[in-house]
Each structure stands twice: as structure tokens, then as C-alpha cells.
Image (tube, grey):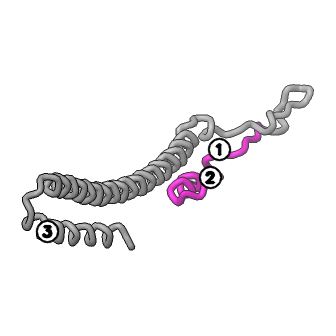
Amino acid sequence: MTEQEMLKEALEWQEHIRKLITATDDELYHKRSKVFDWLLEQAEKVEYWRKQHRKRCNELEDAYFKIQLIENQLHQAQAKAERYEKALEFYADEEHYKEKLISEAQYDADGICISNDEYDPPIIYFDSGEKARQALEGTK
């Protein structure tokens, strides 16, 4: 028998005992009936509080999953912000806009220039916005 069925059975007993007690004036029967009534009230309260407990447990589980979802969204937003920050730092670095000297001008013994300085284009020239696209797409 489940607890619900047991409680229902006890309530039926209570009703049966009340019918018996009304037929007698015995104080002991009345006293025991009141104790039995009190026990049934306690059982009903236990059932009520079990339901409340289950309800609160479900609410806590829901809140926990919502918190996990929000934490996941926060981590994604933080990762996105880091990608954007790295891309911005790359584009903000003034060195990336400067040509790089790869060989200096050559002069002969008389001081006549036989070759000019040679430079590589700035890093930004080769990037063509790729770092920005990667940051926006979330690939790097």
C-alpha cells in the first residue's frame, strides 16, 4: 500500500471510530480519538510538506539549468570579446602599418648608390582584413 492509500485508509478508520465513540461516553475513547485525529493531521501535514519540498526542488533544478545556460552565454560572450580585442590590438599596432626594411642601399667605393633600400610591405597589406573577419566569424 502506498502512503496515500494508507492515509486514506486511516481517514476511513477515523470515521468508523467516530461513529463508535458517539455511542459511548467513555472518556478514554474520546481521548484516544483526539490522539488519532492529531496523528492523521500530522500525516496530512507531512504529505503537504513533501509536495512543497518536491515543488521547491523542481524550482531549484530549473534555476540551476538557467544559471548554467547564462554561464555558457557569458563564456561565449567573453570569448567573443577576447577575439575582438586581439583583432583590435592587431589593427591598432602602429608597427603593422610600417614597411620593413629588408636590405639597405648599396654604395660602391666612390659613394655612388648602386642599389636602393628594399622594403617589405606592411603586415596590414597582407592581412586585408582577414583578422577582423576571423574575429567576427569566431574562427580565431
Horizontally, is 29 left or right of 10 in the view?
left
The residue lying at 62 percent from left, 52 percent from top is 127
The residue lying at 37 percent from left, 71 percent from top is 2
**Mark with earlier residue (3, 1):** 3
Q: SS of the residue at dot 2?
A: helix
Residue named by callout 1 = 122
Query: How far apart are the alpha carbons under marks 2 and 3?
Result: 96 Å
Name the residue nearer the viewer: 55 or 122: 55
Query: How far apart are the alpha carbons under marks 3 and 1?
Result: 104 Å
Q: SS of the residue at dot 3?
A: helix
| The label number, if any, that marks residue 127 in the structure image | 2
Q: Categorize mark 3 by other alpha carbons within 10 Å: few (<14), some (14-19), many (20+).
A: few
Q: SS of the residue at dot 1?
A: loop
- In the image, what residue type sits under mark 3? Leu
**Residue 113: percent from the left, percent from the top?**
82, 33
Considering every residue shown, the one lying at the far right of the view is 109
The residue lying at 17 percent from left, 53 percent from top is 28
**Residue 119: percent from the left, percent from the top?**
73, 41
**Mark with earlier residue (1, 2):** 1
Name the residue nearer the viewer: 97 or 119: 97
Give the image quarter of residue 99.
Answer: top right
Horizontally, is 66 left or right of 129 in the view?
left
- In the image, what residue type sits under mark 1? Pro
Q: Which residues are magenta?
A: 117-140
**Residue 70: percent from the left, percent from the top?**
41, 52
- In the image, what residue type sits under mark 2? Asp
Relative to 101, does residue 39 appear above or below in the rendering? Answer: below
Q: Quadrant of the N terminus?
A: bottom left
Residue named by callout 3 = 20
Verify CB contact (< 8 Å) between mark 2 and mark 3: no
Query: How far apart are the alpha carbons under marks 1 and 2?
Result: 9 Å
